[in-house]
Amino acid sequence: MKQSEIKELSVSDLKDALVNSQAKLKDLKLTHQLSPLDNPSEINKMRKTIARINTEFSKRELE
């Protein structure tokens, strides 16, 4: 998910996206421990997406 897409979401949508992203990250990590992923960079991409969502939360709190 790109930063421009994240900016367009409402607060409730951001919360849903954060919960879904965290669940997907957890699932990716577990899958990677059991058997290597075809594309392990997906873990890094998901971590960055979670960071972008958290950053948007922080920006909106400051406003």
Image: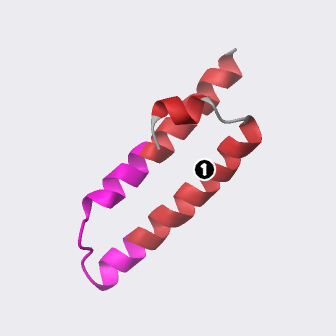
Q: Residue at x 49, y 46 (%)?
A: 50
State how the image is colored. secondary structure
Q: Residue at x 24, y 66 (%)?
A: 39
Residue reaching furthest to the top: 63
Q: Residue at x 47, y 72 (%)?
A: 27
Viewer-proximal residue, 59 or 17? 17
Q: Residue at x 63, y 56 (%)?
A: 19
Within the image, what quadrant is residue 31 found in? bottom left
Q: Is residue 36 left or right of residue 14?
A: left
x, y percent for residue 41 = 26, 58
Up-down relation of residue 7 to residue 26 (above or below): above
Q: Residues within 10 Å of mark 1 (few under 14, many from 20)?
A: some
Viewer-proximal residue, 2 or 56? 2
Up-down relation of residue 50 to residue 25 (above or below): above
Q: Which residues are magenta?
A: 29-48
Q: For numbered disc 1, what is the local secondary structure?
A: helix
Image quadrant where one finds the C terminus:
top right
x, y percent for residue 60 = 67, 23
Residue 35 is inside the magenta segment: yes
Mark 1 lies on residue: 18
Q: Is residue 42 left or right of residue 60?
A: left
Q: What amino acid is labelled 1 in the image?
A: Leu
x, y percent for residue 2 = 45, 37
Q: Is residue 7 left or right of residue 60?
A: left
Within the image, what quadrant is residue 10 found in? top right
Q: Main secondary structure of the magenta part?
A: helix
x, y percent for residue 28 = 40, 70
